[in-house]
Amino acid sequence: MAASTKNKPKSSDTSRSIPIIGIVVGIIVVLAVIAIVFAGNTEPGNEYGDPQVSGQLSLMPPDTRVDTTANSEVSPTVIGQDFDGNEVRIENDGRAKAIVLLAHWCGFCQNEVPTVQAWLDSGGGVEGVDMYSIATAMDSNRDNFPPSAWFDREGWTVPVIRDDSNNSVHTAYGSGGFPFWVFVNSDGTVAFRLAGATTIDELELIMSELT
């Protein structure tokens, strides 16, 4: 008589349990990886943008405050994102522009931002001239970080583009010292570049002379 098989373990049950355990472990690993990736993207040091830059101005001479070497050169086109992920475009659209490049750790920038914002809040600005800003030279090891919190504290209303880790936008505009202003005529050509601390009177005068 054949031996009874009633008490023998069912090999099919064991074989099914192994792939199930493997799938569960796999899901846990994937979820862990996703958590790490998203945690890295929210690290305070990761505020870089991914701007698309077309064009390059002449390098601004070192230790220069007022610069005309790039006058009449075509200003770069920059398409990037602000700190909320919204697209911001600086391009030849037939309007004059005042573009300021800011570093969060720069003492002059820390003075300039609230000064300019107070001017704008009081009705300042120049008719026909659009203002833009670039958050660049970001460094989590330096003062006043992160830049997004700094702009929020100051109530900064000028559209911002986040530069990348290579400071590509800063380089495209000529790598001037901070704050670094680039003034552009309505035809897209550079009218003037200015590095370092400025006054509202200077800004108004330069912006009012853009064509």
Image (spheres, rainbow, N blue to C red):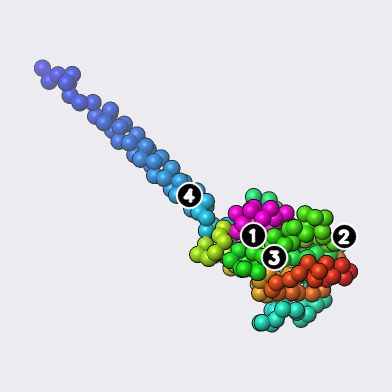
The x and y percentages for residue 126 are: 85, 62
- Res 73 seen here: no
Mark before the other along the chain sequence, 3 or 1 = 3
**Disc 2, disc 3: CB below 8 Å?**
no
Q: How many C-alpha atoms fall within 10 Å of the one at disc 4: few (<14), some, or many (≥20)?
A: few
Report helix, strand or loop for mark 1.
strand
Please identify, in this view, whether the residue under mark 2 or under mark 3 is nearer the observer. 3
Residue at 60% x, 54% y is 149
**Pointer 1 residue:** 162
**Pointer 3 residue:** 112
> Distance of mark 2 from mark 3, alpha carbons?
21 Å
- Res 123 seen here: yes
- The quarter in which the C terminus is drawn is bottom right
Determine which quarter of the picture holds residue 3. Answer: top left
Q: Which mark is residue 127?
A: 2
> Distance of mark 3 from mark 1, alpha carbons?
18 Å
Per the rendered image, the range of residues in magenta is 147-165
